[in-house]
Image: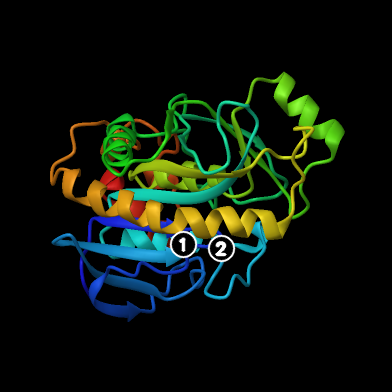
């Protein structure tokens, strides 16, 4: 199996990376089951890159059905250290127009029952999560976006809702009063788990609509897909440029997120839990 350090999670509309060469698909089984689909590994701009469509090919999985634990673990198994999450979002601000791209650096969670952690089963850990996005990776995406001609918005808050329904008008107005910037259904579980897996994580959020708060806009799948189709090639160009800028060595602290996170006495951690979490916790339990 290839070892790759850069991974891409594709969202609505981004089910493949057309410019990947030397492609091969790998099935990765994890202690948390199978990921959303096979992982495609190929070469992009001279770098080995792993691509996984979070909803599965053909968009089969609801946001609440995505196997988040398996997806992140599978990517970590093949060596991913930098994870770019591409996601279609609704804009909650006039300035972020459909077709623009946002790089949020904060999240609010309104999901229900999504997996939030690899911990449990006899081991307790608490990671710092005040800055849920890797600033270094986000900066790379910002520079790549500008070079690709995209209208970029750096920073802001991504509100993660359960879905699959879009917001009511009352909800949309409430969320705007909170000062959020974009709204989506998938990225916060990914950000949490990527931090626990000691990955660098950043979101490339493609604004497709103004949610339903905007008087001149109506949210529909047809409208969203139209904007997505326009933006997919731009997102792929941004990723192509970004992979050339990602350094081999990390200078951030993401790779040591678990250094002081584990509270449980090592001697009290059950053997089965140690085996299940060895990939993520092993070096911290040695």
Judged left or right of residue 245, residue 28 is: right
Q: Residue at x 73, y 19 (%)?
A: 177
Query: Which element type, helix, strand or loop, lies under badge 2?
Result: loop
Q: Position of residue 225 (x, y in %)?
A: 61, 59
Mark 1 = which residue? Answer: 71
Observer able to see residue 11: no
Seen from the viewer's position, the closer of residues 96 and 27 is: 96
Q: Position of residue 147 (x, y in %)?
A: 26, 40
Query: Which element type, helix, strand or loop, lies under badge 1?
Result: helix
Give me the disc on residue 247: none
Seen from the viewer's position, the closer of residues 281 and 174 is: 174
Observer able to see residue 220: yes
Q: Position of residue 204 (x, y in %)?
A: 43, 44
Does residue 144 lie above or below 75 as drawn? above
Mark 2 = which residue? Answer: 67
Badge 2 local density, few (<14 within 10 Å), some, or many (20+)? many
Contact check, label 2 and label 1, Cβ < 8 Å: yes
Q: Residue at x 42, y 76 (%)?
A: 38
Position of the N terminus, as image quadrant, is bottom left
Q: Position of residue 15 (x, y in %)?
A: 47, 68
């Amino acid at each position: 199996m290839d070892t790759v350090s850069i991974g891409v999670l594709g969202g609505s509309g981004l089910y493949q990376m057309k410019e990947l060469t030397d492609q091969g698909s790998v099935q990765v089984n994890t202690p948390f089951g199978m990921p959303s689909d096979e992982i495609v590994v190929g070469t992009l701009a001279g770098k080995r890159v792993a691509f996984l469509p979070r909803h599965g090919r053909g968009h089969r999985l609801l946001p609440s059905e995505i196997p988040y634990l398996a997806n992140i673990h599978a990517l970590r198994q093949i060596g991913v250290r930098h994870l770019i999450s591409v996601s279609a979002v609704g804009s909650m601000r006039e300035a972020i127009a459909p077709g623009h791209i946002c790089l949020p650096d904060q999240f609010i969670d309104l999901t229900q029952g999504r997996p939030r952690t690899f911990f449990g089963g006899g081991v307790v850990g608490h990671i710092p999560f005040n800055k849920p996005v890797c600033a270094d990776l986000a900066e790379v995406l910002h520079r790549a976006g500008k070079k690709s001609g995209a209208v970029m918005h750096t920073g802001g808050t991504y509100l993660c809702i359960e879905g699959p329904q879009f917001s009511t008008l009352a909800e949309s107005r409430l969320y705007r009063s909170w000062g959020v910037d974009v709204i989506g259904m998938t990225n916060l579980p990914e950000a949490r788990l990527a931090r626990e897996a000691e990955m660098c994580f950043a979101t490339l959020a493609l604004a497709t609509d103004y949610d339903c708060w905007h008087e001149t806009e109506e949210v529909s799948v047809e409208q969203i897909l139209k904007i997505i189709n326009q933006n997919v090639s731009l997102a792929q160009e941004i990723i192509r440029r970004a992979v050339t800028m990602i350094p081999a060595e990390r200078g951030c602290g993401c790779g040591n997120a678990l250094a002081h996170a584990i509270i449980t006495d090592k001697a009290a951690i059950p053997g089965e839990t140690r085996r299940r979490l060895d990939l993520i916790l092993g070096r911290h339990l040695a």
